[in-house]
Image: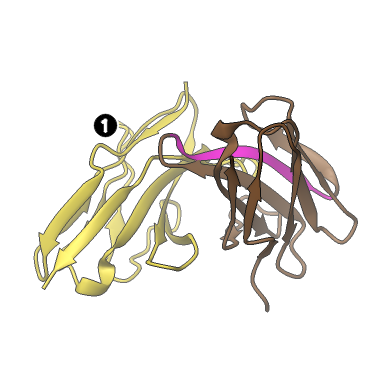
Amino acid sequence: KAGVTQTPRYLIKTRGQQVTLSCSPISGHRSVSWYQQTPGQGLQFLFEYFSETQRNKGNFPGRFSGRQFSNSRSEMNVSTLELGDSALYLCASSPGQGSTDTQYFGPGTRLTVL
Amino acid sequence: AQRVTQPEKLLSVFKGAPVELKCNYSYSGSPELFWYVQYSRQRLQLLLRHISRESIKGFTADLNKGETSFHLKKPFAQEEDSAMYYCALRRYGGSQGNLIFGKGTKLSVKP
């Protein structure tokens, strides 16, 4: 099976703009999670979607939002970008049904905010 | 508060030496603990989980609830073990996607 894919891989934006990142999970996986990775804070959970519904949300401001489509693909949006939003954004998918499911991570989208 | 602490940012050992990557956690309920690994230019991937009690690539980890630790160990390090290692936690039986990660330890195995 193809792995988790994320597009775009690199993105440069300026402060105040908004951005949309995309994640395609492994075929058959219904759960998609998003994480932000920065040198200072490490890996932090943003949110998780399962069957088009947000199942969990991390401690991020409302500028960070996401959604999941019926084919399980997911997007996350960041509005009014700030310099501190520069990070690697990782997406992970899992089947989503069992408590022992393994998460599979994508390569990430590197966002730079100037 | 739920927290995972990896006290060492960098751990450097020689090939053939034992290695122990430390992980301590703070969690009020029943946690499920994981070790993830990221090799150079590769994706983050699961190495092992405490409920499986298995050995992967010679690595083992035992959950010590008394000391709230989940240290990763390998008796004889290999150069190919050089990577970033992340300890992670989630609520047992909880949603799969909500992991709390430590900040990672970079393991460097010298020849």
Provide the major secondary structure of the magenta segment: strand
Q: Indicate the amino acid at tag 1.
A: Glu
Nearest the eye: B67 or B101: B101
- The colour chain A appears in is brown
Judge whether B101 appears above or below B43 on screen. Answer: above
Q: Is residue B25 left or right of residue A108?
A: left
Task: Please give the residue where the numbered disc 1 appears in the rendered image.
Answer: B67
Instruction: Kindly give the residue lying farthest to the top in the view shown.
Output: B1
Q: Chain of mark 1?
A: B
- Count of numbered badges drawn on the protein: 1
Q: Is residue A111 left or right of residue B23?
A: right
Q: Residue B44: x and y, percent?
A: 48, 60
What residue is rendered at 51% in x and 44% in y? Answer: A37
Q: Which residues are magenta?
A: A41-51
Judge whether A81 appears above or below A94 on screen. Answer: above
Give yes or no for residue B6 being in the magenta stretch: no
* Quadrant of the rendering where the C terminus of chain B is positioned: bottom left
Give yes or no for residue A47 being in the magenta stretch: yes
- The colour chain B appears in is yellow
What residue is rendered at 70% in x and 68% in y? Answer: A26
Q: Residue B81: x and y, percent?
A: 27, 68
